[in-house]
Structures are given as structure tokens and as C-alpha cells.
Image: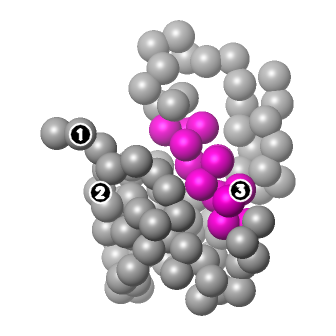
Amino acid sequence: MEKTPITKTISIEDLVDDYSFAIDYLAKKGIRCLRCGEPIWGTLEEAAKEKKFSAEDIDLFVSELNIMAEESVSDSGGNKKLDINIGRIES
């Protein structure tokens, strides 16, 4: 089964179903999800806007989540470390 691409329009349900690492990521950003104990429906963008995140923040979330998704399937273990607290990629 193919995973749903991570975009700002991905549903929270698809995001956490297809990318389990997103649960911790969302929790660190203060966005609760169904598995985090608070039923949230709608898209990543809608959930982030409810928490007063800007469009730029949401774009950063999408970028960080996609990097994490790429690293989770990488056989080489990758040589990049993502710091989701400040949104920078370190070599």
C-alpha cells in the first residue's frame, strides 16, 4: 500500500497512519492527534492554523516531516540530523 504524500493538505489521520514518527513531531509542536489523546480531524494545515501557526511555519512542518520520512526509509542511515525544535538540518 502506497503512503499518502506529506503536504499541508494531508489529513491528520493519514499522516499518523502512514508516518508513525509524526505523532511525536505533532506533540512537540503542540498539535494533538487522535493517537495523542485529542481527536483532531482535518488537514495538517487546519490543525496548525488552529494552534495559530503561520503559513511559513506550516511549510516548515511539511519540509521537516518529508525529511524525516526520507530518512526513515534510508538504508544508509543518512548523514543528516534534523533538529525539529529549531527547524535546522545539521550535517
Kindly check if marks 2 and 1 are in contact, taking CB atoms under 8 A apart as contact.
no
> Which residue is at 68% across, 59% downward?
59
Badge 3 local density, few (<14 within 10 Å), some, or many (20+)?
Answer: some
Query: Compared with residue 80, is residue 34 higher up or lower down, i.e. above or below?
Result: below
Quickly name the residue at label 1: 2
Q: Which residues are magenta?
A: 57-69
The residue closer to the viewer here, 55 or 78, is 55
Nearer to us: label 3 or label 2: 3
Q: Which residue is mark 3?
A: 60
Which label number is shown at residue 17? 2
Residue 33 visible to an observer of this rendering: yes
Q: Are marks 3 and 2 in contact (CB under 8 Å)?
A: no
58 inside magenta stretch: yes
Q: CA distance from mark 1 to mark 3?
A: 24 Å
**Secondary structure of the residue carrying numbered label 1:** loop
At label 1, the amino acid type is Glu
Q: Quadrant of residue 31?
A: bottom right
Task: Tell me which label, 2 or 1, sits earlier in the chain.
Answer: 1
Query: How would you rate the neighbour count of disc 1 (Cα within 10 Å): few for under 14, some for 14-19, many for 20 or more?
Result: few
Q: Secondary structure at mark 3?
A: helix
Q: Quadrant of the N terminus?
A: top left
Q: Which mark is residue 53?
A: none
Q: Position of residue 41 (x, y in %)?
A: 36, 82
Identify residue type, mark 3.
Leu
Residue depicted at 32% across the width and 68% down the height: 13
Q: Amino acid at mark 2?
A: Asp
Give the farthest residue toward the left. 1
